[in-house]
Amino acid sequence: MIAETGHYALILALAVAIVQTVLPLLGARLRDPQLAAVAAPAAQMQFVLVAIAFAALTIAYVTSDFSVENVWRNSHSAKPLLYKISGVWGNHEGSMVLWVLILALFGASVAAFGANLPRQLKANVLAVQGSIAAAFLLFIITESNPFTRLSPAPFDGEGLNPVLQDPALAFHPPFLYAGYVGFSMAFSFAVAALIDGRIDAAWARWVRPWTLAAWMCLTLGIAMGSWWAYYELGWGGFWFWDPVENASFMPWLAGTALLHSALVMEKRDALKVWTILLAIITFSLSLMGTFLVRSGVLTSVHAFAVDPARGIFILAIMGVFIGGALALFAWRAPLLGQGGLFAPISREGALVLNNLLLTTACAAVFVGTLYPLALEALTGDKISVGAPFFNLTFIPLIVPLLIAVPFGPLLAWKRGDLVAAAQRLMAAAAIAIGVAILLLALHQRGPWLAPIGIGLGLWLILGALSEIAYRVKRTGADSAEVWRRLRNLPRAAYGSALAHAGLGLTVIGIVATTAWRSEAIVALKPGDTAEIAGYELTFKGVAPNQGPNYRERIGIFAVARGGRAVTELLPSKREFTVEKSDTTEAGIHASWRGDLYAVLGDPLDGGAYSARLYFNPLVRLIWLGALVMFAGGAVSLSDRRLRVGAPMRGRTKAAPVAASK
Amino acid sequence: MARRKPLFALAFGLWILVLAAVPAGAVQPDEILADPSLEARARAISAGLRCLVCQNQSIDDSDAPLARDLRLLVRERLQQGDSDGEVVDFIVARYGEFVLLKPRFTWTTALLWFATPAVLAAALVLIWLAYRRRAGSAGLAPLSASEKRRLKRLLDES
């Protein structure tokens, strides 16, 4: 009965979504405010209905109702509760329901918090949002119904792919989807603006918080996925340039560009046409990510999502929305007109450079990800495009961007002074270059560019600090005045400084661990000792253990450093009895210098075991940096100007942000 | 690595080597060659070869049995005195271009390699055109005769 309730709620939600699409658009066309006003309650109703469906599916999972086919396929009664719940979105059908749930949540939020939106804009936004929901609900109901029943009900389930039974991966999809789907807000606002044929700085003010929230979720989602790959896949890699990873990385790159171009639009009313296009592109890339992962067009480590028949449907959804939006763009964008003027050397100019490099980098990832698919479809030739290609195309675009980042916030709007900005960054540059030279001297045998990479990361962090320091200290102030200015600085300034510094942390983490990781591949008998990066690891043998739904062999390594015991590492091999597959659990000891990372291999002849030991210097900075970026977003989101919401239609100008001279 | 010396001249090529030449992986203790320089070459080659049954993982990273076979094959060829290029050619001859994680530059991959620079160039041109159009349209036109007269009048009045 619960499953049927969920199914029924989905069908009702589809009906409501259609109403939410058609009536407000009609209302806007006929200038009938009552029809347009249907949008808000419809959006909220749609959310309630999808939430009921999602709750029904969750209940079926928690109670292990194996008469529901989806539960039977992806769950097992012996699974821990957390993974019963995460199993809801650990499969195709359930994850699509989560997708629509988040979509509906964003729509309902606009309905609830968008009281100060112009009525027409609000109706159009919710109508577009409703049409996306309708398309995906139709897809779920016709092609991927999670509530299909089995008769007779099987005795127990088939279990969830063991590599997915992991805390980080339990929460990775919800964050990733919140990011993907969050960009639908930017898309809906863009399309609504095109339908209206009118757009102004206030529009950007409304769009920015939604985009920022989506960007934050996506940042965290990607970081979680990378963190998971690091400790779960058993060799300490954190990024594979796997198509599925790229699918989430492209919206992130485009979304980051969108955040910055929306800033120009909000503050200076410039880059309007481009911002609209970028909003469309960002969500299109999100849709493409969903398509790539959900259609099974890629066979990858994420291959649990394979079903080609469904691909056509999602492809059709993509075609309609992307094609429709781009056609509308081509037709209406010329109406939007131009905005404020600026010199090439200015805050706007810096943000244009940001957009140029980010979107080109995004294009590089796009080409590298899709080219093999296209080539195979057209000629049948199979090629691989892997890490070497992306490093060669992506990194040369990102390095100049990283160099430019600290300059941006120090340039004034309209017309900036590059020399003055450079003077304010002298200290940061001197320290970064000094450290790079020091590292170069310490690591004379290379890799030679690694110290430069570290210097670049430091440059970002110190540059962010310099900006804050300049803002509070300029025109000589005493300590009380500095303190007052520190408190009065808009939170958005702290937010962007934090986000840029977080990027620097991530860069340092990536460079350090890639360039200076050490490894030892050894065969150890109980009692043997291996040495790596100053640690001595003594192999004490292997102990069997029984988990809730797996058996494991735990390797016991006593770790000492300079004769003093440090810790014990317990890497294991888990054998999942129901799913009949194995996972490798690395043993990791984290310190401020880096991670000691041990992986237990297979038994060899004569009682020995193979083991792989790594020392990954500063590797945690990669994810710490992502957390700092997330925090930066959160601080910026809490800025009063965004919290209070967009200004009323009067288009009040924001108080100028300090940097103008 | 000496063979790659000329590449070091290119700053970014070097950058890539830094990133790509650091191996990590699923190599087993019994596979490692006694000669460290030979082993280092084997690792560098392995990092550029795809594990055919995995997704975008190199044979150096993969636990799959096929990856192990390929790693052993690479080492066997190296021990028989093949150069790095000969080893790669040998593997490509058997498994096709698909094993190369960095596709070779051929007419079918030209678009792949040129796409990014082309996008960058096109974007730069568009930005330049947009800037020129704006600078041109933004009141930089000289004052008309009537405007000049009006300006003169205003100035005279004050």
Image: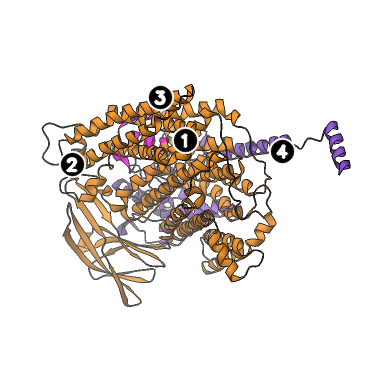
Q: Colour of chain A?
A: orange
Q: Chain of mark 3?
A: A
Marker disc for residue A158? 2
Going by the numbered disc 4, the residue's amino acid type is: Ala
- Amino acid on which the number 2 mark rests in the picture: Glu
Q: Percent from the top left, x then y, of residue B18? A: 50, 56
Q: Point out the tag, 1 or 3, that comes first from the N-terminus.
A: 3
Position of A531 compared to A121: left or right? left
Residue annotated with mark 4: B135
Local crowd size for mark 1, using a 10 Å CA cut-off: few (<14), some (14–19), many (≥20): many
Q: Quick one: A438 or A92, which is closer to the camera?
A: A92
Q: Secondary structure at mark 1?
A: helix
- Marks 1/3 same chain: yes
Looking at the image, is B151 positioned above or below residue A234?
above
The residue pinned by badge 1 equals A187
Mark 2 residue crowding within 10 angstroms, few (<14) / some (14–19) / many (20+): some
